[in-house]
Image: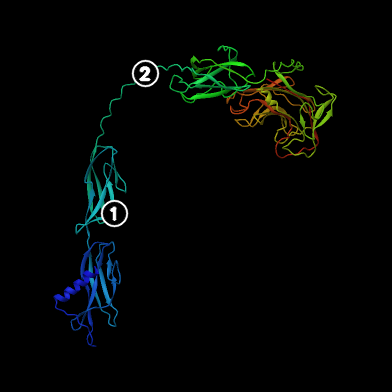
Amino acid sequence: MLRRACLIVALLLVACNIEPRHATGPKVQVAHVFVMPDTVTINPLATQQFAAYGRTNTGDSVPVSVQWSTSAGTITQSALFMADSSENDVTVTASTAATTLLTGSAVVHKHTLVAIVLTPAAVTLASGGKQQFTTKGIRNNGDTMPVSVTYAATGGTITTGSLYTAGTTAGAFRVIATQAKGFADTSIVTITAPPPPPPPPPPPPPPPPPGSPGQVTDLAVASVTNTSATLSFTEVNDGMDAPASYDIRYAPGTINWGSASGVTQGTCTVPVAGTTIGARRQCTALGLTQVTAYQFQLVAFRGTLNVNAVFGPLSNVANGTTTGSPPPPPPPPPPPPPPGSNEPPGFTPVTDRPFDALTELGWGAGAALSLFVDLNGPKSPPSVGQVTYLAGFGGGSAPANTWLDGVNSRGYTQVYVSLWLKLSSNWQGHSSGVNKIAFVWVHGDPVVYFSAQGSGSSPLEPEVRLQNTPAGARNLTPNLANPEFTRGQWHHWEAVLVDNTGDLANGEAHWWIDGVKVGEYRDVQYSSSSQSKFWGDELSWNPIWGGVGDAVAQTQYMWMDHFYVSGR
């Protein structure tokens, strides 16, 4: 652009036959300043290169040094002008820096907006249809330019971003774009009526009746131990294109389905839920007898056993013999239970601690456990166990305890607990109301404990309490009678605990006080299917006094005679 301006100046000098001369005398001086070009028309924000020359008082054209300025936009001192965004005319000025200030100027005209165009000019849409519109400006020289407009619409809506949505009424409507200077353009929108809905399809034919569950034909004993057998089979359809469930039974010798036992321990515990049709499945039956030949059989079903189950054919019979040594001869029959006992028939004695010594029959004892002579002991006087709570003893622990570990090795899922207990007549219940007595463990946790509930000198209620179960803590309050655990008197506490099967809440808790049944629950989940269900990881007299806080006001005692346990 600068070279073009210089060329223009040179051509002008040639055309006018003006030969540049150098002023050398004192009377030769610049009298006028001229800007080239003196008039120009450009777009807003466009650039234009200018040039300046001087004319002396003798009429010669000479180079001149000037300062550039502009009424709007910007101009560099190399005379490169940039227009602003308006459409207003601008004056560009060149000024000398000599003693006598001389100026020359040029006028910059802008190409102006003369119309706007809305695109598309016409469109046909269905009700709810959308169309993106655009608008551009037209300058007086034919150039296009972006413009800011406001939109309006009839028969629909249009956003500020020019997205139009057709209304629900059919007909011809308009979209109007309006620019701030009053320029406007309109597009025609034709909204068509929706087609009539198609007739409803005919109702589908009724589905075929469901089929029967499939038959397992490849049941096999994959492996055995001395007390378990692992079964394998291919899962089948339940007749409704879903994996079937399974009822698995077993019997020593030859199996008869009607009289065979359902599996109640291990991952083969009935019912076994299906996973994937056609998948190879394994599960384990626990609680078997050593060195015994067993037969196994299963049936696939859908629904719920004993409610609405639909069965398929019986599977093939699988055979397996457990390992190990022959079972020892049966033990001598247990002694008859004490008078008034609620021990169920068929239970095998596990332990009967009479408290004739601090440690006996495999029981461990804390250093603070002591023996006490009570000629009125209810089971075998005169020796009974004693735990002493000295005045000032704080809540949250037991002063002494005694325990027996490893009973779970017997594999008993049912257990009977019997103990005789006496609280001193001045017994102060912990402020939390919790006065723990004895614990029964399962799956490695203290899950059940017996508690004489009551604070201060208020009446004490015998409760069975649960902790460390899949469902969390739970308090089993008496629901058959309302006994009081009287201070200063011996009471006989009995309980029968039956572990649940699998993940079902079908475990049981029964307990008696002095021969009277005071509580019965049959909806307990002691353990999950992945946990051991054998009682007796530990049995303990661990009389924790309450929770945190509170203190014993005066020395008090708890006595026990005969901690007896049996199981099945």
- For image coordinates 21% across by 67% down, the residue present is 40
User: Camera-side residue: 150 or 463?
Assistant: 463
Q: Position of residue 391 (x, y in %)?
A: 80, 38
Report the side of 313 relative to 498 (left or right): left
> Disc 1 residue type?
Ser
- For the point 37% across and 18% down, the residue is 206
Q: Position of residue 30 (x, y in %)?
A: 23, 82
Residue shown at the point (22%, 60%) measured from the top left: 112
Q: Which residue is mark 2?
A: 206
Mark 1: which secondary structure?
A: loop
Q: Which residue is mark 1?
A: 148
**382 or 84, nearer to the observer:** 382
Q: Residue furthest bottom?
A: 26
Numbered label tally:
2
Whole-percent x, y for residue 415 in the image: 68, 22
Confirm whether residue 205 shows in the render.
yes
Q: Is residue 339 above or below residue 365?
A: above
